[in-house]
Structure formats: structure tokens, C-alpha cells
Amino acid sequence: MIIYKNIEEYEINRDLFRSFIRRQVVVKCLRRENDCLFVKDDPFIDDWTEEDYDTLIACLKNTARSGGFVYGAFYDCKLKGFVSVEPQFFGVKNQYLDLSSIHVSEDMRRRGIGKALFNAAKIWAKEKGAEKLYISAHSAVETQAFYNAMGCVEAEEYNQKHVAKEPYDCQMEFLIK
């Protein structure tokens, strides 16, 4: 049985991720050239190094400490998925909250965990008064299929901080109803 719960700042450490498998084999990605999106072969394996985990842990701790949302899916008391939403509004109308991360462990994908995590983030953001979630999304076609199934579309307004950090990401939004 999968248990979903908030993750507190004191719980966020390297041990939390010991049973989490980030690995994603990517073959095809969405790429933008001359204002057109197309699918392109771009094979690679996306995984996290220890340095990446250190950065992730620092970011998630900061999110929790600053009043953001950090929420996890646990199976057999082990973290198998998580989502985070930053608490700071942005955008021309201050309508966005940033869904800063959503990941499901490789061994638990395609079981509805991502959908449950996304829905929890959406509910939290709505309670905070957000009109939209902003997502700087991995360009892998499988990742894009997930966001499209959730109802995400290309962002009307790009967050330039995300574009500069991850130029191949797809900048997306979700309208909260």
C-alpha cells in the first residue's frame, strides 16, 4: 500500500532517498527550433549524482523551511515519489506557483503515483490562491505525455530563470480550477 504524506524539513536527508531510483532512459525528446516543436532522437540516461542529491536535498529543505509544499509517496516505508511547490508567487499577475519537482522512482512508475502527487500539488496551490502551476518540464516524450495527460499546456509566460537553467526543458503551466 502506498502512503502519501507531507515531508517535513527535518526528514529531508540523504537516507530519505536510499531506495529512490531516479534513473530514466531517454530516447526521444521534444525540441524547439524556429518556434516549432518536434520530436528528436536524443538518447541519454538521466540519473542523479551524489552532488545532484546534495543540491536536491538543499532545495527541498529550503522549500519546506520557507512554507512550500514537499509531499511524498511511500511504499514499505521507503520514498518512491515526491513533489514540491515553491511558496512564492510570480508572473505578471502573480498567478503562478512553481511546481519545482515531481519524480517517481523507476521501480514504481506507471502505477498512478505521479498523478496522485500532481493532484496533491494542485490542491495545495489552489488553497494558497494560485491560478496556475508553472512547470519547467523535462523534454523526454514520456515526461511530456504525463504532463499532457494531466492537462498541462505550454506556458503563456516563461520564467526566464528556468529557461536559463534548463534550456531544453519545456515551459508548461496547469490552470487550476
Image (tube, rainbow, N blue to C red):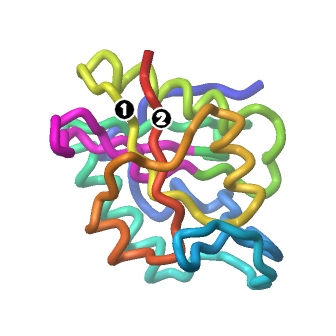
Queried whether the magenta region covers residue 85, the answer comes back as yes
Asked if disc 2 and disc 1 are in contact, CB closer than 8 Å, the reply is: yes
Give the x, y percent position of residue 29: 72, 71
Image position, residue 30 (x, y; %): 68, 68
Mark closest to the chain's N terminus, 2 or 1:
1
Residue density around tag 2, few if under 14, some if 14–19, many if 20 or more, within 10 Å: many
Q: Is residue 111 above or below residue 4?
A: below
Whether residue 149 is situated above or below residue 101 in the rendered picture: above
Q: Quadrant of residue 76?
A: top right
Magenta-colored span: 82-102
**Residue visible at 54% across and 48% down in the picture:** 102
Direction from residue 30 to residue 60 in the image, left or right: left
In the picture, the quarter occupied by the N terminus is top right
Kind of residue indicated by mark 2: Phe
Query: Label 2 vs label 1: CA separation?
Result: 5 Å
x, y percentage for residue 161?
A: 27, 68
Residue at 81%, 82% in the rendered image = 41
Query: In the image shown, does 96 or 156 lie closer to the viewer?
Result: 156
What number of labels is visible?
Answer: 2
5 shown above or below 85: above
Q: Is residue 73 magenta?
A: no
Q: Residue type at mark 1: give it.
A: Lys
To which residue does mark 1 refer?
132
Element at label 1: strand
Disc number placed over residue 174 in the picture, else none? 2
The mark found on residue 43 in the picture is none
Q: Residue at x 76, y 78 (%)?
A: 40
